Amino acid sequence: MNGALSSYSLSAEIGRRLRAVQDLMKAHGLGVLVAVGAGAPGGRGWIRYFTGANIWGPRVFLVLPATGSDTLVITRSPDDAEWLKRSVVGGRVESTLTARITPIQRLVAMLAELLPAAGAVGFLNMTALTVDEVQRLREACPAAVWRDLTAEANRIRQIKSAFELTAMRETGRLLAQALDIIAGLARPGARLGDMLGEAERFLRGRGCELGRVECAMNGAVFGEGVDVDRRPGQDDVLQVQLKYAGPLGYWHELSRVFALGRVPGPVAACLAATTQALAEAKAQIAPGASYAHVTAAAERSFAAAGFTVTGRHRLDCHTSGTDETDGACPPKDGWRFQEGMTLAVHPGSLLAGGLGFCLDQTVVVTAAGTAPLFPVEAALVQGGSA
């Protein structure tokens, strides 16, 4: 890591997060807090947030104490445990396979030790518990009070520290470099898989372990997959969206549009309208404003440009952090922005004719509105020969 993101800084940062959530636990009278982790989008972020480690197994539990810093990661595989031990900051890791029990059995036994007869236990990502896990927990602690603190804890992690903003800017810098790689390869007749593959190879090599690259052609919304053998022609316009978690697990979204030759009139009009809608959407984001303001502004912008909105192909914006979305998804219309939140902004209006450029920018909410976490070039980059 560089000086701004040293291991010492990460240790101090994780200590700050733990103390903040322990204040929340105290307010609710909780003796212990359990984060439920799974190797899937939305199921990894809490483990990364409180330990600095990226989980690999299908089921992981993180036990957070009411005081002190003795956190415990419970996983099944000894191999996973060894990898976790190399990256966990200030906590312990246990594999349950060597004891021939499951992670839920270890969690149940630990809660029975920690909780008084009628104690209270909190959960993060509680809805990820399986029916069997819920039954085992209820049988072991029948008098315990359960509290789902996911929403309240999310309100804490949605406000980013200087350390976190630096980590997210670093992810953005890497994504911008990957888009520059695509720009250097984007030529009529070039194989799509080669362009995207070089960008992904660069990102994986720089520690972006989780993420994906998506692309679409000529103003169409993203389809189900990428035809890697397709070779775009002179009149094709390629849009590329990168969504990746960086070396410290912080997500960033960035996109760019590449013209391989001339830009057909309808496609140019759609791109111009979407670029303006993105600007109008960001202009509505400020502390106290709501998600509904962003949607309304984007749709007004498209209407002013002469386009008919026929539906939605994605959210207009969402919070981002150690999970791709560190909050309710989709957010409620009345959900309000706060200073220090980081957002992936991308107008999601579907336009008549199936058009809908996917333009993305990741920003931080400031007292004055928004600021991009990584400055980007204009949406349209000319490639190839005209």
Image: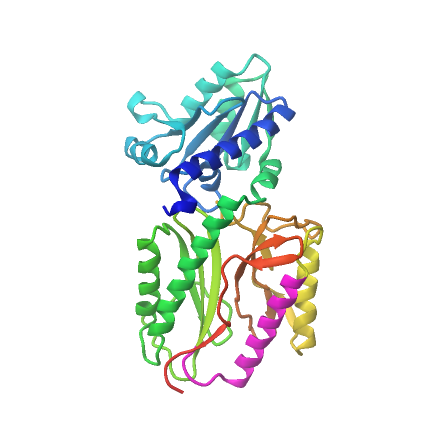
Residue 72, percent from left and from top: 42, 26
Q: Is residue 157 left or right of residue 307?
A: left
Residue located at (53% from left, 18% from top): 141
Where does the image place residue 360, in percent across and percent down from the top left?
Answer: 52, 63
| Residue 233 in view of the camera | yes
**224 and 215: which one is in front?**
215
- Residue at 68% x, 60% y: name it: 284
Q: Is residue 384 magenta?
A: no
Give the dominant element type of the magenta stretch: helix, strand or loop.
helix
Above or below residue 314? Residue 9 is: above
Locate residue 281, reporting x and y percent: 64, 63
Q: Residue at x 42, y 60 (%)?
A: 175
Residue occupying the point 54% across, 37% down: 127
Furthest-bottom residue in this view: 386
139 vs 149: above or below: above
Horizontal side, residue 88 vs residue 279: left or right: left
Indicate the quadrant containing the C terminus: top left, top right, bottom left or bottom right: bottom left
Q: Residue furthest top?
A: 117
Q: Magenta region: which residues?
A: 259-283
Q: Residue 331 appears at what percent x and percent y?
A: 63, 50
Judged left or right of residue 242, residue 184 is: left
Q: Is residue 228 in view?
A: no
The colour mode here is rainbow
Q: Residue furthest front?
A: 3
Examine the image and state in which quarter residue 234 appears: bottom left
**Could you tell whether 11 is left or right of 143 in the image?**
left
Q: Nearer the viewer, residue 210 or 377?
A: 377
Q: How many marks?
A: 0
